[in-house]
Image (tube, rainbow, N blue to C red):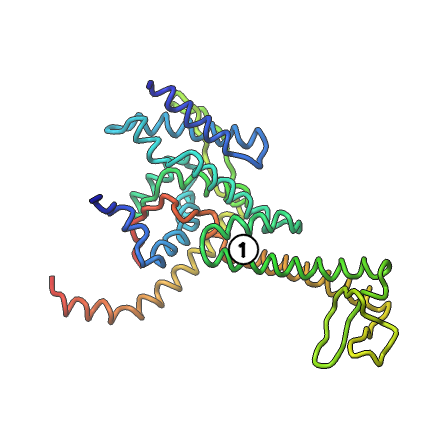
Amino acid sequence: MTTEIQVNGYLARLRASLTGMTVAEREDIVEEIRMHIRERSGDPGTNVEAALAGLGPADELAQQYRTGLLVQRARTSISPVVILRAALRWATTGVEGFIVFMIAIIGYAMGGGFILLAMVKPFFPANTGFWVGPDQFSFSFRLGATMTNPASPVHEVLGWWLIPVCLVIGSLSLVATTKLLQFLMGRFHWKVPFTANAHVRTAMMAL
Amino acid sequence: MAQPDHSTTEIESPDKWEAQMRKGCLEMAVLASLWHGRLYGLEILRVLERDSSLVLAEGTIYPILNRLRAEGLVESQWVEAEAGHPRKYYELTQSGRDRATRMAETWTRFSAGLGYLIEPVLKDRRVEQPL
């Protein structure tokens, strides 16, 4: 296999794996890596194979680019979709990432649940509410429950106030989850762009 | 029976904090390497290796530079080089200089404090294991 075919094959795999960015961004990256290979393989005692080995597999290199940009976007975005994607990518790197992802899932599910409850209330007023009973209370949608009989063991207490209460709690949950995740990504962002098998073989810096 | 891959074992040793610490230093080291002027990717790798003994895999540097550019800490420019092919040079922005300064100050405070703390540890080790 000629060196040119090797290089072009590597760059084609890199290009195919660089998803989630514009064509201009992708070609800029590919061109920079092409120039790196060209210059590195010209060093004494080095060849194209060594230059490609130094870069690591093309899909892993692309993943580092994608994760870095995704986390950067998540730190400034308010879109739960973008933040969840970044949290999911982080979850693949270790325990901390998994915990953050669980925080994201629970926080957004809770926020979404409250807002959904507020939206359902006008259509099923008798089944949706804040239910209080002996040794229990919950916000939920209940089939067969009653909101009109306060003497019932489990009864609804908020009435139509449920809608604003759920909207406020739901919105606060979504905002708080987003802010918490952005804080965590900003605080630990240096850990995020690296996969567990990143090719890091650094020598220890002197303290 | 296959021989263990010592290079991999070294990277994934139980002392993961060491690898995490190195990763944590990378951003500061890359920003610091650009302090005196613009450099291209391979030059940054060589500067890090020469001046800090921080040797990293070549593929690691480019995603880091890309992220630093997205954060506005560095800016890049393609320049036609004497080598016969263009090179992508990176330069610190004002925001990057500010970040590098803050990181260097924090690092200096941290390492000075920790150095004082671990001095007895290293001193006792030298006594126990004379060279």
**Which residue position holds label 1?**
A186
Q: Residue at x 35, y 54 (%)?
A: B19
Q: Residue at x 49, y 40 (%)?
A: A65
Give the x, y percent position of residue A104. 60, 57
> What is the secondary structure assignment of the residue under circle 1?
helix
Chain for mark 1? A
For the N terminus of chain A, the quadrant is top left
Give the x, y percent position of residue A133. 75, 78
Q: Residue at x 24, y 71 (%)?
A: B120
- Classify A88 as above or below A131: above
- Classify B10 as above or below A42: below
Q: Nearer the viewer, residue B128 or A20?
A: A20
Q: Is B42 left, or right, of A82 in this rendering?
A: left
Q: Is B63 left, or right, of A106 in this rendering?
A: left
> Three-letter amino acid code at disc 1?
Gly
Q: Nearer the viewer, residue A51 or A105?
A: A105
Q: Residue at x 52, y 40 (%)?
A: A66
